[in-house]
Image (cartoon, rainbow, N blue to C red):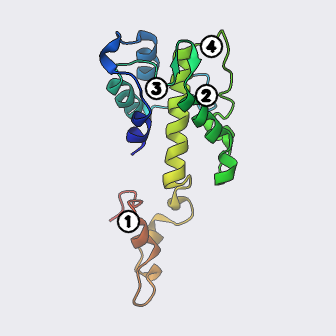
Amino acid sequence: MRLAVLSAVLLSAAWAAPPNDELQQLVQSGSLSDLRWPDFTRLQPDAARFYELNGYQLAWSRSGRATPQALALIHAIENAAIKGLDPEDYDGRLTYLGADTDWARFDVALTVSATRYISDLSSGKVNPEVFFLRSALRSEEMRPPGGSSRADDYRRRGWGFGLP
């Protein structure tokens, strides 16, 4: 889903230009020091697929300027508080656009930030296991008479975390 949303904003054909080597290296590294949380190894496979679909071309800028889609995404991230999220969790300070902007670093930062933001919007930020003991999630005691347990509800939504 995240990949599909991000891929939908691409406007240029992937085969139009050779791959951007700096962009490819940044994505493959799984880390970007510009980010509040630089390690994005968990998201690296999604980022790699996103850029592979685009031939490792910049997705969020053209001719040294941020695309309208990038600016709209930055605006959404800056206003994450409207959705109950902290903009700083998604590097809401991505507005450092200027003549000396390293567009490859900007591109990866926005892709990672957008992926984190979309993930938290769609799935939430809190792991239910933080609030429920693993054994409690397995317990039949949580099941109300004639109803389903909270653990069953989590499993139906795909939040089972590998629990039986």
Report the Cα–Cα distance between label 1 and label 2: 32 Å
Using the rendered view, name the quadrant where residue 91 is placed.
top right
Work out whether 17 lies above or below 128. Answer: above
- 14 or 19: nearer the viewer: 14
Report the Cα–Cα distance between label 2 and label 4: 15 Å
Q: Residues within 10 Å of mark 4 (few under 14, many from 20)?
A: few
Q: Earlier in the sequence, mark 2 or mark 3?
A: 3
| Residue corresponding to mark 4 | 101
For the residues labelled 4 and 3, say whether their Cβ atoms are less than 8 Å apart. Answer: no
Q: Residue at x 50, y 30 (%)?
A: 111
Tell us which disc is closer to us: 4 or 1.
Answer: 4
Report the Cα–Cα distance between label 1 and label 3: 30 Å
- In percent of width and height, residue 164 lies at 32, 65
Position of residue 113 in the picture relative to residue 155 (left or right): right
For the residues labelled 4 and 1, say whether their Cβ atoms are less than 8 Å apart. Answer: no
Q: Earlier in the sequence, mark 1 or mark 3?
A: 3
Q: Secondary structure at mark 4?
A: loop
Report the Cα–Cα distance between label 4 and label 1: 44 Å
| Residue corresponding to mark 1 | 155
Q: Earlier in the sequence, mark 4 or mark 3?
A: 3
Q: Earlier in the sequence, mark 1 or mark 2?
A: 2
Q: Residue at x 69, y 30 (%)?
A: 93
Type of residue at label 1? Arg
Q: Residue 30, which numbered label?
A: 3
Report the Cα–Cα distance between label 2 and label 3: 11 Å
For the residues labelled 1 and 2, say whether their Cβ atoms are less than 8 Å apart. Answer: no
Tell us which disc is closer to us: 4 or 3.
Answer: 4
Q: Residue at x 46, y 24 (%)?
A: 59
Q: Residue 35, which numbered label?
A: 2
Q: Secondary structure at mark 2?
A: loop
